[in-house]
Amino acid sequence: MDEKELYTALIAKLSKDFSLEGSSLPVAANLALIKEFLVKRINELMSRDYERFLNSLYRIDVSESKVQEILHSKDKTTVTEKLADLIIERQMLRLRTQFLYKQGKL
């Protein structure tokens, strides 16, 4: 799986997990743009529907201890960036695992 395929799959997965319309996510295979968009979406969800945000994290299967560590950190300015990194990291791991499984390497 090349980088472009991976980012395309990541965008599709994030769109599904956060109930987003595909057209609202960046279409470029650019991790910085994807992260920037995700940071905005996390801010929106945290301020408007915190419960839904937590449910999304649960569905994605992000480490609860890492989320708690980020949410309770002293530096509140980077919370959404760190959460976005955590979500992207988890989704990339899932995508790579699915790819390897499809190829019969797992």
Image: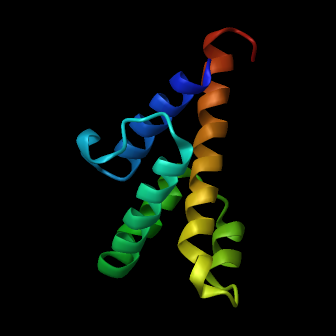
Answer above or below: position of 75 versus 40: below
Q: Residue 51, percent across and down?
A: 38, 74
Q: Residue at x 63, y 70 (%)?
A: 67
For the N terminus, the quadrant is top right
Q: Residue 14, percent across and down?
A: 43, 45
- Coloring scheme used: rainbow
Q: Residue at x 28, y 39 (%)?
A: 22
For the C terminus, the quadrant is top right
Q: Residue furthest top?
A: 104
Which quadrant of the structure image shows residue 77? Answer: bottom right
Q: Residue furthest right?
A: 105
Comparing 102 with 22, the one in front is 22
Q: Residue 2, percent across and down?
A: 61, 19
Q: Residue 98, percent across and down?
A: 60, 25
Answer above or below: position of 7 versus 18: above
Q: Residue at x 60, y 26 (%)?
A: 3
Q: Residue furthest bottom?
A: 74
Q: Residue at x 67, y 87 (%)?
A: 75
Answer above or below: position of 33 versus 22: below
Which quadrant of the structure image shows residue 25? Answer: top left
Q: How many marks?
A: 0
